[in-house]
Amino acid sequence: MRRITRFTLLPLLLVLGVFTMGSAATDARFSDMGHKLMCTCGCNQILLECDHIGCPNMGRESAELRTMVDRGDSDHLILTAFQDEYGPTALAAPWLTKFNIVAWVVPPLLLLLGLAGTFFLVKKWRLRVASMPEVPDDPLSRDLRERIRRETEI
Amino acid sequence: MPAFGSFALLVALALSAYNLLAGGVALRQLATGARGVVAPERLAETARRAGIASFIATACAAFALVWAAFTNDFSVAYITEHSNRALPAAYKFAALWSGQEGSLLLWAFLLAAYGFVLRLRHRVDVKLFAYASTILAGIQVFFLLLVNFAATPFSLVPGGAIPPDGNGLNPLLQYPEMVIHPPMLYLGYVGFSVPFAFALGALMMRYPGEKWIHITRRWTMVTWLFLTCGIFLGMHWAYEVLGWGGYWGWDPVENASLMPWLTGTAFLHSVMMQEKRGMMKSWNVWLIFSTFMLSILGTLLTRSGLVSSVHAFAQSAIGTWFWVFLVIVLAVCIFVYILNRDHLRTEHKLESLVSRESSFAFNNLVLLAACFTVLWGTLFPVLSEYVQGNRVTVSAPFYNRVAVPIGVFLLFLTGIGPLLAWRSTSMRSIRKNFVVPGIVALFVAIAVIPLGVHPWTIFTTDHEGAFYAWMTFSLAGFVLTAISSEFLQGAKVIQRHTHLNLFASAVQLTRRNTRRYGGYIVHFGIVLIFIGISGQAFNQSIERTMSYKQSFNLGPYRVECLDYSQDSNPNYDTEFAMLNVYRGGHLVTKLAPELRFYTASQQPSTIVANHSTLAWDLYVIYAGKDPSTGQPVIKAFLNPLVSWIWIGLLVTIFGTGIALLPNMSAAIASQRRVTAPVEETAEAVPAGRAGD
């Protein structure tokens, strides 16, 4: 009996899990996609963050997005559909295509070049720095070093 | 009053122009040794006095505009557009900066006020202050030209027919913080004119040594503090008023304020290298030049209509003025730099990659990279239109991917910088200083995973937020431990010599080197801000139409609709909902989100209801009525850790205040030794470690 219960409950739980997961996943995906799109009423805000009261576009665009997400359209398909309908400004960030790649590549590239430049500059300067004289190892110097170390310990 | 205001502005312009010309001639004569009809010293003094008088004239103009708002003088077009009879008094005062013309007048007034203080303090270094005063007068002339001829705040209503009432203030600006946010922001923007003027003046006169940095240090820090407060007040205003659940939308106006803040922060760090080691002189000069020019560029971007913005004065015709001014400033900076660049030769060079100097250099690089990213993202739509023929949007997803990693890297540098010694750091010292913070970072990295921070989601989804939040929490643990150990080690040494308790020792340690330890407190505040911002990765939201007694769950809260109704007063009509908030079955608070409709401006505005705790904010807005049922639509957000942003700001303000205080002097220390024999050994303790 226990085995039967286990065998009947397990698929039921799995089915339930898949269904609830699907619903939560759809909501999450709707929210995710809604943050990749802009409201096109001119408010210059992310679609799901548009706080423009009485906005003529936000409701319609959200409904379109909800339909596409429920239908299971891919991200690419949804973004392309919005771009085709409302123009490239409907996307919250440019696609990784043609000239738009420049938008994504230039800042990290400059940072990396800057870091590499600083690294090599320091290395070059370090080579030019004259080496420090040898520290004498007599008791007087040791005491002096110890005193300096103690007094500048903060 | 409008006539008085206009006249005052003209007088201010004439006086500033005299300050610029007479000051310029006097400084030229002093530099070349030439003598005119009037001795150059006397001419410079008349220029200084004209500068002081121009402040009085500008103040009169600002007063005239405020007076016109308070007396409902609707013959002035600006007052008609930005005020009305029913407007509360505090917001009538805020009308001064709620529109283009008024905000430019505020800019001119604040610049004149900074100039006034500078000119009164001229005895610190008469010649350097004369240069700085003349350069400030040049900037002042530009803004006075704008308010006299391009964006006049005292224009009368067209046709002369005075309307019975005004259009009222934009409802979004009718919020207490808007009375202080714009002046703070402008104090920040305008304030960078002063270190800019000193830097340019010092370069023009080939000022010997680094004294000009000492003179401008407080100016720069105060300005930075104002800009910081202005930015965060703006964030708080956006959070509490705009009702979209966030505080930073990467709008061009927000970006415009962030750019000079980033370069200003870089300047505050790198200038220490010039003071301590005579390094990065050209870099510092260009940092402060850039900071000032970015203040102007930001204003140009947002007021010329070049980029789209949610802010009001995006479209106007004053862009050309700003372009011309920016080109002139850039040309002057380049010209003066080329003429005097040999004066900026560095005295030392970086000797090791693992040193305080290197950490400052990398910190500067990262701050500049962050600034460039913001500028790049702001300008890319314009560039795209020029190259591709179509405009694209560059909004939050771009900055989250590009700017956030840079911010996390900066947090990392904030942690390691103070642990490194000047010139070079030995491996022994690295091991000693890094072990405990490293262990704490590792502990935090593991401890936050059961709390729901799952960094591996970066590999399974395209959400990188949790990963960056995990990095931030771990690095925050590292930085906070590093700062605490710095305080602890220093306080222990003081304690050994003074026998004070540990807290009193830490206070004395801070007072002995306010700049160093005040700086650490600022870093502490910045870390708290980073922690608060990281919470954004775990935001949740829900939207429901609610009838009586209906409820929804969000995080640990259950929100129940108790009632909904409407009300009216002379300024606005309102619809609102009364909500009970339960946690674990207990009522924790009542919230009343509103939707107001302002009568004069005929504009709606949401009033957010927010239940804020240290863990999260339950942020509720009244999104409107369901047209079919007439029931309220409630949108709720659960925003984790937001309170830490505001707490971090307070800590940052406190730290900057400490850093502005003078160090406890040797005289006081010796006096204490006399009065307290137990402290006799205190002279063995130096006033802070050598480095800042």
Image: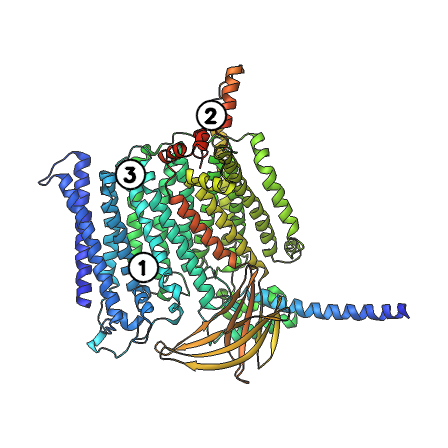
Q: Residue flagged by tag 1: what amino acid is it?
A: Gly
Is residue A106 at all visible to an observer of this figure?
Answer: no
Q: Secondary structure at mark 3?
A: helix
- Residue B228: percent from left, percent from top: 41, 53
Q: Who is closer to the viewer here, A57 or B22?
A: B22
Whether residue B303 sits left or right of residue B26 in the image: it is: right
Tag 1–tag 3 contact (CB < 8 Å): no
Image quadrant in which you'd find residue B74: bottom left
Q: Nearer the viewer, residue B224 or B462?
A: B224
Residue situated furthest right in the rendering:
A1
Q: Give neighbour class at mark 1: few <14, some 14-19, many 20+ (Cα, 10 Å).
A: some
Q: Amino acid at mark 2?
A: Arg
Please rate how many residues cluster around mark 3, counting C-alpha atoms within 10 Å: few if below 14, some from 14 to 19, many from 20: many
Secondary structure at numbered mark 1: helix
Query: Whole-percent x and y of residue B653?
Result: 42, 51
Q: Which residue is mark 3?
A: B202
Residue A96 lies in what quarter of the image?
A: bottom right
Residue, far left = B37
Residue for point 26% across, 46% down: B118
Mark earlier in primary sequence (1, 3): 3
In this rendering, the answer to whether B496 lies above or below B103 is above
Q: Which residue is mark 2?
A: A128
Spot occupied by residue B269 in the image (x, y as percentages of width and height) = 43, 41
**Disc 1: host chain:** B
Q: Secondary structure at mark 2?
A: helix
- Residue B319's tag is 1
The residue lying toward the viewer, choosing from B657 and A21, is B657
